[in-house]
Amino acid sequence: MLKCKKEKKRLEKILKGYGPGLDPVAATHSFVKELLDPQPDRYDKTYRYEHSLRAALWGKRIAEAEGWDSEPLVMACLLHDTGYPFCETMEEWNMHPTYGAEVAKLFLQKIGYYEELTENICQAIRIHDKWNDVPEDATPFELSVRDADDLDRFDIMRVCMIGRSDIGERSARELIEVCEKRQQRAEDWKDRICGTDTAAKFWKEKLQIQRKLYEDLKEEMQGTLEMEKLLEG
């Protein structure tokens, strides 16, 4: 399934450095860092790697709150975006979960990880880009990789990043309109399906942060209009 010959060859070379007997989480982190290859002058690569670290942190929090062994979920979250290096075009980006599942399986088999957990991790990666169209038989574990991914994608940094296209040097009225649309979007997303009660709680907290951020920005912009009205009499 992996098409990019250059990246396939690089993957094969990287995999040669791994085998049974290694600490699973440490080995996974090392593998992901090698594959995603963060570099000071490549924001895209650095972001993808650091996003994987943050997703893993959310996975750890979810697992611990649910009373699970955190190891497989942390590993799955670290591995969830390893399909991106094999996407040669923007059109292929929606294939990254499929590619990532294949990469993860090759790695997990190489280190001799548990067969059943390997399948669980690969399925979790395969469906991590779904919204509410998740398979009916998806397990809480499989949904939790998706939850961890989205919890990071909806953090404050991403809110600010995504906002650059329609928030910036715009008029107060335009920004008020943007804020109202964003607040409505957060309201529409409040019932997103989550794999666990823990993830649902975290999700609601993220949306509340967004609502507050846009409410504060809207209030500042309304102050602009109020001052103009006062000056104009």
Image: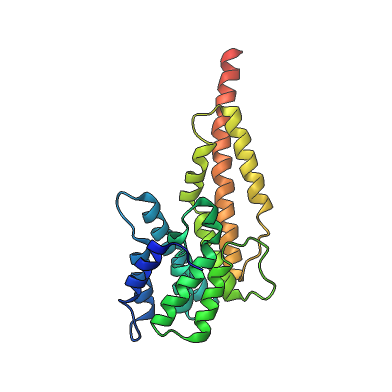
Q: Nearer the viewer, residue 127 or 182?
A: 127
Q: Nearer the viewer, residue 20 or 24?
A: 20
Determine whether 219 is above or below 42 in the image.
above
Count of numbered marks: 0
| In this rendering, position of residue 94 left or right of residue 75 | right
Query: Which residue does the image show at 59% across and 53% down from the upper left?
Result: 207
Q: Position of residue 16 (x, y in %)?
A: 32, 77
Looking at the image, the residue that sits furthest to the top is 233
| In this rendering, position of residue 225 left or right of residue 85 | right
Quarter-of-image position of residue 35: bottom left
Determine whether 155 is above or below 147 in the image.
above
Would residue 68 be visible to someone looking at this image? no
* Quadrant for the C terminus in the image: top right
Would residue 114 be visible to someone looking at this image? yes
| In this rendering, position of residue 185 left or right of residue 152 | right
Q: Position of residue 103 (x, y in %)?
A: 45, 71
Determine whether 35 is above or below 221 in the image.
below
Query: Which residue does the image show at 33% across and 86% down from the upper left?
Result: 21
Determine whether 25 is above or below 21 in the image.
above
Q: Position of residue 115 (x, y in %)?
A: 50, 86
Quarter-of-image position of residue 94: bottom right
Colour option used:
rainbow
Q: Position of residue 24 (x, y in %)?
A: 38, 80
Q: Nearer the viewer, residue 182 or 104?
A: 104
